[in-house]
Image: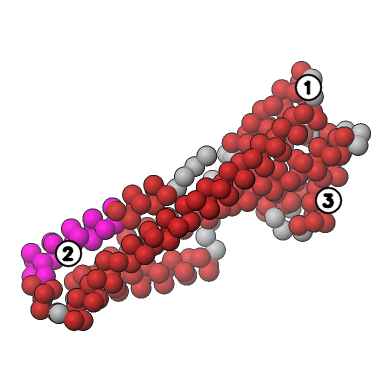
Amino acid sequence: MNKNRDRDYNTYRLNWKENLFCLLSASGFAGMISWLFYHSIYGMVSAAPLLFATRRLLRMYLSKKQKREMLYQFGEIVQMASSSLKAGYAIENAFVQAHQQYVKLYGPKDAIAQEFCRIICRLRLNEPLEQLIEDLAQRSQIEEIVSFSQVLSFAKRGGGDMKKIFQDTAEKIRQKADVEREIATVVAAKKTEQRIMDLAPFAILIYVGASSPEFLAPLYGNPLGVCVMTVCLLTYAGAFLLAEKILDIRI
């Protein structure tokens, strides 16, 4: 229960397998750069910045994935709590029932299951529900959870239709999930094309180097060639990051 107590979902911590993946990927990519762009072992100095970049990109990807899954899990909890409210449960007991149903369906290992396990334990110590949801919202910084926390706090203080609040939140999360699936379907082909284009420069260098090495020979073993290849490599890196940014469609 306590391992999520102070967890900041905005900072993803890589486990040892993910760190090993980053290390092997950066080393392999650095070796490829050394051979294709410089024909020199000194190109391996790129391994350090590549390791940093790989870890950063992987953390960003996994953090977004974790938040997306957490949002959908939260939507499931709210939907189940909404059903319990309709059955006549008080709001706190509605979340207790929702958590029990969620664990039966999806197991206790999900982030939201663990978070609500903690919330329910603290409810039994008479801590306000709105304060506990607000704490989760601050640590996750997920827009829908933040909005739900604010509306819940206002409704608890001034009175409000809790059933409607819960239904609206669950519906908003469901609609967002549908839109994200539609976007993923539309851009899937473009992402595949982009992955192919990411590999194209390396494939060209391998082909030309194997079939006509004399064309690339002037670019190796001299300062001018090193500068030209470095500019090409930096241009490729910039194009890669720009393409990733374009394909990262947010709603």
Q: Residue at x 84, y 39 (%)?
A: 83
Instruction: Quickly name the residue at label 2.
Output: 229
Q: Nearer the viewer, residue 82 or 57?
A: 82
Instruction: From the image, give the main secondary structure of the stretch colored magenta.
Output: helix
Residue 91: x and y, percent?
83, 34
Q: Nearer the viewer, residue 23 or 87?
A: 87
Q: Residue at x 47, y 45 (%)?
A: 249
Image side of residue 89 versus residue 199, left or right: right
- Of the numbered discs 1 and 3, the one sitting upstream in the chain is 3
Q: Residue at x 36, y 64 (%)?
A: 196
Q: Residues within 10 Å of mark 2 (few under 14, many from 20)?
A: some
Q: Whole-Å distance between the Cαs marked 2 and 3?
A: 59 Å
Q: Whole-Å distance between the Cαs marked 1 and 3?
A: 25 Å
Instruction: Quickly name the residue at label 1.
Output: 160
Residue farthest top in this picture: 158
Question: Circle 3 — which element?
Answer: helix
233 in magenta? yes
Q: Residues within 10 Å of mark 1 (few under 14, many from 20)?
A: few
Q: Disc number at residue 228?
A: none
Q: Nearer the viewer, residue 191 or 65?
A: 191
Instruction: Quickly name the residue at label 3.
Output: 101
